[in-house]
Amino acid sequence: MYINWAEQEINLKIVYYGPGLSGKTTNLMHIYNKLDSSMRSELVSLSTKEDRTLFFDFMQLEIGEIKGKKPKFNLYTVPGQVYYSNSRRIILNGADGIVFVADSQKERNDENLDTLLDLENNLIDKGESLQDIPWVLQYNKRDLPNRESVSVLQKKLNFWGVPYFESVAHRGVAVFPTLKEIIKRVIVHIQSI
Amino acid sequence: MNLNKGGNGQPIVLSGEMYKSIADVLTDLSSKTRAKTIIFADMNGHPITQRGQTTEINIPNMAALAAGDFAATAEMAKMVGEKKRFKYLFHEGEKTNIYLSNVGEGFLLIVVFDSDIALGMIRIFTKRAIDTLSELLANAKEEEQKASKFLDVEFSNYLNQELDKAFNF
Ligand SMILES: Nc1nc2c(ncn2[C@@H]2O[C@H](COP(=O)(O)OP(=O)(O)O)[C@@H](O)[C@H]2O)c(=O)[nH]1
Ligand SMILES: [Mg+2]
């Protein structure tokens, strides 16, 4: 978080976290495609030739002036693959809120949990935890036939009872509601500190 | 306010006075070096202020990438046994160069300049600017203003309304 009183500006960082291929980049692409260019920066993707996120994706949202204040939201995704754990830790630095994008497919159950624990470990290293930081869960790929039931996903991943969304990111289902909820949570959290 | 902690994810709150002092240093550096663009940002990639040509370059993206650059090379520094991140990074192009320096642990300075300007000159003036900035930041008084004061309840109500409008597809 960065606040500039002279410019009445507040910059907040929101990180999309989750296992590889769960749909993090797709969330950002949908936001990018839907929003007017006056409200967002270009989408930068540091990706491999195969389109896998190598370091991060980044885009800034600017909602415009609200009561004279200029809130800006910096959206990042992390690379999901296990061997990029260092990159995830780096990108998590300074995060004000997290969207955990889980892959609903049954065979991805273990990876979802492993990545959530990886997130918690990275937060603990910085003296934070999933208990304090604002975050939401997104169960993505709800369109696939091999999807796990939401009640099982809830049991496996949502120990903290945070808000969750059932999404189909490539069709834009629940992408904006997820974003709106994390923004709301981040703001409420700031007001409490 | 512990400005050195900026890079660790601590909230950074800049007072108006501090912001103006930083802006003055950048104005000075800009006129002395004839750099194309100068950006001061925090290590999390949030741009703070900029000088020069600022419309051709996408400032938020540039700041985010510069912070990523420092983060990546800090890991490289560790791998070769350095205790701290590299002090500066230099990227040389055909027509344009970029000189990135860290300012304390929590901030960074991006200087974009034509390749016909001598790097030595950029380095000398940038070094001076960094010294001034570091001193400014180190002597910053504990900020009274809290983040929560910046965002009152009325603000969140308006923000929610704006988000509903903006995300209404
Ligand atoms: N069936 C289905 N595919 C999706 C969904 N969301 C994303 N995808 C696809 O999953 C793949 C990986 O998505 P990507 O966003 O790159 O994953 P990331 O590694 O988390 O960034 C892409 O081919 C997407 O088109 C979804 O809701 N349903
Ligand atoms: Mg990706």
Image (cartoon, grey):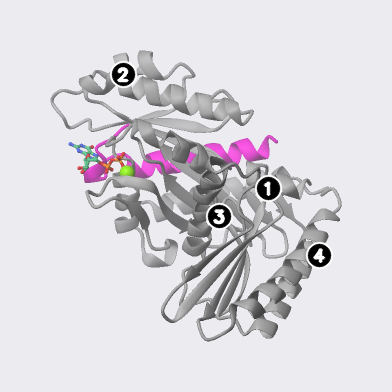
In the rendered structure, does residue A168 fall within the stretch colored magenta?
Answer: yes
State the extent of the magenta-drawn residues as a range.
A166-193
Q: Which mark is residue B45?
A: 3
Which of the four quarters of the rendered structure image does ligand 2 lie in? top left
Looking at the picture, which amino acid does disc 2 mark? Answer: Asp
Asked if the residue at tag 2 contacts the one at tag 4, i.e. Cβ–Cβ closer than 8 Å, the answer is no
Distance from disc 4 to disc 2, alpha carbons, whole Å, reads: 51 Å
Q: Are discs 4 and 2 located on one and the same chain?
A: no
Quickly name the residue at label 2. A110
Quickly name the residue at label 1. B6
- Pick whichever, A49 or A31, lies toward us: A49
In the rendered structure, does residue B69 fall within the stretch colored magenta?
Answer: no
Disc number lying in front (4 or 2): 2
Dot 1: few (<14), some (14–19), or many (≥20) neighbours within 10 Å?
A: many
Looking at the picture, which amino acid does disc 4 mark? Answer: Glu
Asked if the residue at tag 2 contacts the one at tag 1, i.e. Cβ–Cβ closer than 8 Å, the answer is no
